[in-house]
């Protein structure tokens, strides 16, 4: 059991090179009661993930220097983050992208602009109390 399992906070990490989009989503999720951190590069996101230990990561794919695919693979290899819930949040929605998202270890693929109901539904489902049976 990791510290993420016993912590009452619902931690979400946003990694997106679009500063405005990340800030807007951070404000929205914070208003809904989530503890949210944002990074605007893949490397910054990886460093933040190590200390923040998010439950869920919304990750843009098309970032310079380090793509979202590379970040996802690196996150899966980090101690304590191998089971983090990874969501690709991207404008790309072709068959090649969808296959690459699966190969990189993402749990879900959302197309920008993702609608509010879709995002909150995923978060509600993830953070719903797990039945003990």
Image (cartoon, helix red, strand yellow):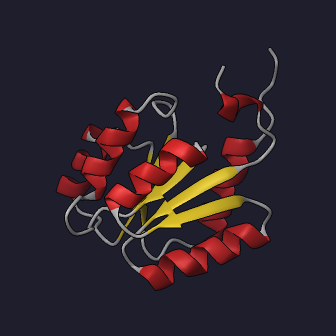
**Where in the figure is residue 86, as x and y percent of width and height?**
46, 46
Residue drawn at point x = 55 percent, y = 45 percent: 51
Q: Tell me: residue 36, above or below residue 46.
A: below
Quarter of the figure with the C terminus: top right
Examine the image and state in which quarter residue 8 appears: top right
Residue drawn at point x = 80 percent, y = 62 percent: 33
Residue drawn at point x = 73 percent, y = 68 percent: 30
Q: Tell me: residue 114, above or below residue 126.
A: below
Tell whether 124 sits left or right of 83: right
Front position in the image: 79 or 123? 79
**Where in the figure is residue 85, as x and y percent of width and height?**
52, 42
Residue drawn at point x = 43 percent, y = 50 percent: 47
Tell whether 41 sits left or right of 69: right
**Where in the figure is residue 58, as x and y percent of width and height?**
49, 58
Tell whether 26 sits left or right of 71: right
**Where in the figure is residue 111, as x and y percent of width and height?**
41, 67
Front position in the image: 93 or 81? 81
Quarter of the figure with the N terminus: top right
Q: Is residue 109 visible?
A: no
Front position in the image: 50 or 126? 50
């Amino acid at each position: 059991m990791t510290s993420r399992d016993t912590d009452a906070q619902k931690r979400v990490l946003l990694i997106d090179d679009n500063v405005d989009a990340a800030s807007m989503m951070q404000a929205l999720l914070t208003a809904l009661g989530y503890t949210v951190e944002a990074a605007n590069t893949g490397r910054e996101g990886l460093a933040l993930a190590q200390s923040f230990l998010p439950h869920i990561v919304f990750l843009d794919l098309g970032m310079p220097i380090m793509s979202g695919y590379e970040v996802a693979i690196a996150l899966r290899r980090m101690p304590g983050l191998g089971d983090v819930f990874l969501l690709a949040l991207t404008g790309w929605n072709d068959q090649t992208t969808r296959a690459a998202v699966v190969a990189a270890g993402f749990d879900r693929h959302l197309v920008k602009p993702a609608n509010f109901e879709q995002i909150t539904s995923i978060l509600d489902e993830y953070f719903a109390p797990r039945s003990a049976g």
